Amino acid sequence: MPGPQQLIVIAIVALLVFGPERLPEFARMAARGLAKVRNEAAKNIGELREITEFGEIEREFNDIRGQVTGTRNQLRRTLLADDQGTHGRADASAGGVRPDDRPPPTDLEAT
């Protein structure tokens, strides 16, 4: 940012280059141009912040999705292994032997 002395030098040079009649018109045009640049810069910074936050959220979402997929696959493998083990025991129990070798429960009042 230019200091006060630099601004005075710029004003004197502008006065000499554009003349006193056109200097106010040039100052208004410069102010409008500067305002447009500032507005566009603010808009672009806002868009970049949104994009950056969205990108971060998307990365987190993909990480969580990967974890959930891994957990789901692990559960499926575990359930399949248990299911296959249960079928093996069911075949053994079909012959009358219980997997834990205990007799079935009986209700003495019902007999």
Image (cartoon, rainbow, N blue to C red):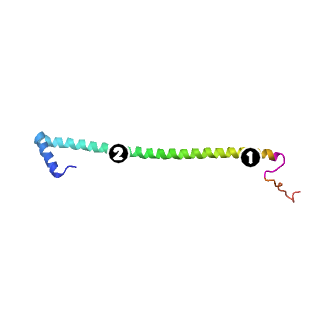
How many residues crowd mark 2 within 10 Å: few (<14), some (14–19), many (20+)?
few
How many residues crowd mark 1 within 10 Å: few (<14), some (14–19), many (20+)?
few
Give the image location of residue 32, x and y in percent.
23, 42
Q: Which residue is mark 2?
A: 45
Kindly indicate the quadrant of the structure image that contains residue 110.
bottom right
**Front disc: 2 or 1:** 1
Looking at the image, which is closer to me, 95 or 54?
95
Give left or right: position of 5 versus 44. Answer: left
Amino acid at dot 1: Thr
Q: In what quadrant of the picture does the C terminus appear?
A: bottom right
Element on which disc 2 rests:
helix
**Mark 1 or mark 2, which is nearer the start of the sequence?**
2
Give left or right: position of 108 versus 18. Answer: right
The residue at the point 10 percent across, 41 percent down is 16
Q: Which residue is mark 1?
A: 86
Amino acid at dot 2: Ile
> Which disc number belongs to residue 109?
none
Looking at the image, which is closer to me, 105 or 103?
103
Residue 111, compared with residue 90, is above or below; it is: below
Magenta stretch encompasses residue 48: no
Looking at the rendering, the stretch of residues picked out in magenta corresponds to 93-99
Most extreme residue toward the bottom, as rendered? 109
The residue at the point 45 percent across, 46 percent down is 56
Dominant SS in magenta: loop
The residue at the point 21 percent across, 42 percent down is 30
Give the image location of residue 63, x and y in percent.
51, 46
Give the image location of residue 48, x and y in percent.
38, 44
Element on which disc 1 rests:
helix
